[in-house]
Amino acid sequence: MENTKKVAFITLGCKVNTAETEGMKKLFREAGYEIVSGDEYADVYIVNTCTVTNMGDRKSRQMLRKAHKLNPNAVIAAVGCFAQVSPDKAAKIEGVNLVVGNNLKHSIVELVENHRSTEKQKYVYERKALCEFEELPIETYEDHTRAFIKVQDGCDQFCSYCIIPYARGPIRSRKLDDVLKEAENLAARGFKEIVLTGIHLSSYGEKEGVGLTQLIEELHNVEGIERIRLGSLEPLFLTPDFINNIKNLPRLCPHFHISLQSGCDSTLKRMNRKYTTRDYRNIVNLLREKVEDVTVTTDVMVGFPGETEEEFQKSYEFCREIGFLRMHVFQYSPRKGTPAARYPDQVDGRIKEERSRLMIKLAETLQKEVMSKFIGRQMPVLLEQPVAENSNDMEGHTPNYITVIVALDSKKAGEIINVRLESIEGGRIRAVALDS
């Protein structure tokens, strides 16, 4: 192995990036490279970047500089969303040799091996050219007990705050047969849970006449897959027909991440979101009526331009009313090139910080309220990782995405066991393993 070249990956951002990194790892393995940790010395560093917020940009730049410090002579490739949106900025970072936008990750090995060390080379398509789904098959996931399958890319929603439609291009979907083949391969490698991911998952198959419902139904028949979990969904996708079609599919996890962003209609309108709080409430109520043990998680933004104290309070109270299991709370971050960055009445940073603090505190309260409803229940848990190095405690998740810790002597990550939920410990439930 002395002459084998080493490649390291650093992945930022969403689950779609995670899936794409695994696909690129497979390409490098097939080309004879050894995969090493992102903290190790390597001949090649692939930084799969993020640009969803200013923080994403900043971390992307930091990781590229970190790679250069680890080995100043390495080939360093900035790939993904930051590279797509800001190729010139990425190219100016010391040590960066290649800037590779979205839909070119399948050529990453060839681009790395053909690069000329004396040049900065940029390979970035325009948005309109990102029209075909980029196939990056995955064999396995290192250090994961659930497998993410990317089935969709791109977004045509153009929410007023979001740069992603420019970074990822128009909507496009993976062929159904390719998804099923990957699911079968992952099941054969022992994965019991798959997570369907996409930039705008709700639009899967929209142009191809397939649809997410059919995909779920087909995956339901893949032998060895015991759980199918969905990534983030747009509220209006969850129609009565969809809910009625999936309510009797036992392998589909009763957990739905439904993007909210704000619980105030005026704010939603300025965001160019396509639903109202009434729509959202009706969807959640129908899910709770039709799907046993269902839980709902969401994303909530605070400090959007023009958000008054009254609007924030409406959003706060709406979140309290819905009762989410989890809320990903984040502060509005202006993104150059989006309409919202030019809106008047930008909210002061200190106000955003305080609203974020209040919303996060509410999220913690709501999580405990939701978890308390399941105390005493028996549920299956997918074991994922040890809680601590010198402990018998394992952490895992129920089908409805409640985090569980359970003391075990011999069980290992990737197994599904039955437990009884006993007591709340922070953001998790302490459980007791039951005899199978």
Image: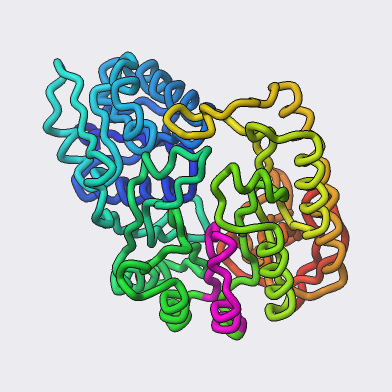
Q: How is the image coloured?
A: rainbow
Lateral position of residue 162 relative to residue 20, left or right: right
Residue 132 lies in what quarter of the image? Answer: bottom left
Q: Up-down: is 352 above or below 221? A: above
Report the side of 357 relative to 231 (left or right).
Answer: right
Considering depth in this image, is 178 or 316 the residue closer to the camera?
316
Residue 102 in the image: above or below residue 86? below
- As drawn, 175 above or below 145: below
From which residue to which does the magenta span run? 226-247
Going 35% across and 73% down the picture, which residue do you hit?
180
Q: Nearer the viewer, residue 313 or 249?
A: 313
In this orientation, which residue lies closer to the viewer: 235 or 339? 339
**Looking at the rendering, which quadrant does residue 110 occupy?**
top left
- Percent position (x, y) of residue 227? 55, 72
The residue drawn where x is 60% and y is 26% is 344
Quarter of the image with the N terminus is top left
Q: Work out which quarter of the rendered image holds the C terminus and state it.
A: bottom right
